[in-house]
Image (cartoon, helix red, strand yellow):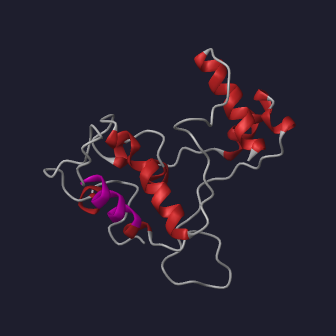
Amino acid sequence: MKCLNEPIAREANREDDCTGHFWESRFKSQALLTEQALLSCMAYVDLNPVRAAMAETPEASDYTSIKERLTPQFDLAQAVQNQLDSGYLRQFPVSLKPLLNFEGNERNEIQHGIMFRLRDYLELVDYTGRIIQPAKRGAILETIPPILARLCKHPCFSCTAD
């Protein structure tokens, strides 16, 4: 975790023109030990722009895994080059990877992705995003159709896709 935390803290301190630990007070790192914990964390992150009233829907939010899955922008070669240029890969051997695939809901011997269907994850995020949180500014409005209905019109998503 030190290898991950230190460069992030240095960059954040540079951006904020401050010193000190980045992972203090409201920031912390938490090991995600189960697939349920991973999915909960993913949904939380994908809903952050909606909860902050920066986007109406998760798929319209920049820098979320949902947007990346629907309209891939990640270029592994460019990401590695950016890390080499910044010096981070020389300091800490971190491997950069694209998002893991959703592999459905049946465990197999050569599991390489998340044991959940993409459709189910999208519905989970959409349902969770509609729950009103008094401490948060935003939620997915009831007048907006469900995510799968919205995505049937999206060029990168098939209505029959898993």
Relative to 157, 136 lies left or right = left
Figure label count: 0
State the residue in front, 41 or 141.
Answer: 41
Residue furthest top as drawn: 17
Quadrant of residue 62 in the image?
top left
* Quadrant occupied by the C terminus: bottom left
Quadrant of residue 12 in the image?
top right
State the residue in front, 40 or 74.
Answer: 40
**Which residue is pictured at 40% across the width and 43% down the height?**
48
- The answer to whether any part of residue 68 appears in the image is yes
- The location of residue 2, given as percent across then percent down, is 76, 43
**Which residue is pictured at 57% across the width and 83% down the height?**
107
Relative to 76, 26 lies left or right = left
Q: Which residues are magenta?
A: 121-130
State the residue in front, 47 or 152.
Answer: 47
- The location of residue 37, given as percent across then percent down, is 52, 64
Q: Where is 6 relative to 132, above or below? A: above
- The location of residue 159, given as percent across then percent down, is 32, 67
Q: Is residue 138 magenta?
A: no
Q: Is residue 124 magenta?
A: yes
Residue furthest front as drawn: 25
Relative to 72, 23 lies left or right = right
Quadrant of residue 28 in the image?
top right
- The location of residue 65, given as percent across then percent down, is 49, 51
**Which residue is pictured at 23% across the width and 50% down the height?**
132
